[in-house]
Amino acid sequence: MFAVGLDLGTVTTRVSAGGGTGAFLEGTAGGEGLGMFASRGFQISEKGLRIVETHLVQFGEVPENTAMISRLRAALKSGEELTGADASFYFHEVSEATLMGRGVSYEAAHATALGKYGVSPFSVYHPDVIKALPGRFNSNWSTFWGAL
């Protein structure tokens, strides 16, 4: 398990009938920062994006997920590589979907996906999404991204 330099006890959790949003879960630790996504770009695929969209539909309408999907769609359309939070979100959700498809619980899949890439739980949403939806994120997100 990796330690995160932020107080995870105050992460806002949005719970649906399915137990979470596919976004963040109170008390979950991951790595620090952007892990392997800090300095590399990655190609997105239509297949990968379909996996993410299919996975997230189980959590209902979640504005921050919708905003991130829009960012991923734009990157796919333009051929732009994913970096930073966009890559963190994409790979996190693909990994989480794969694990849950194998029968792993949401909580375990979420934690495993964060640990797999060595990322902070606060890395999975782009700062522009956090700024656009301030009521959906607490101050830990701003602290992680450098006081948005």
Image: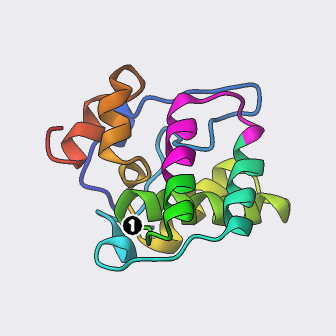
Residue 27, position as x, y percentages in the image: 46, 43
**26 is higher (above) or lower (below) than 77:** above
Taking the magenta stretch, the answer to whether it contains residue 51 is: no
Taking the magenta stretch, the answer to whether it contains residue 66 is: yes
Q: Which residues are magenta?
A: 57-71
Viewer-side residue, 138 vs 71? 71
> Magenta part mainly helix, strand or loop?
helix
Viewer-side residue, 94 vs 67? 67
Q: Looking at numbered disc 1 in the image, what kind of residue is underneath it?
A: Phe
Residue 9, position as x, y percentages in the image: 37, 36
The N terminus lies in quadrant: bottom left
Horizontal side of residue 103 vs 2, given as left or right: right
**In the current view of this chain or complex, which residue is farthest to the front?**
78
**Res 63 quadrant in image:** top right
**124 is higher (above) or lower (below) than 98:** above
Please give the residue where the numbered disc 1 appears in the rendered image.
2
Q: Residue at x 42, y 52 (%)?
A: 121
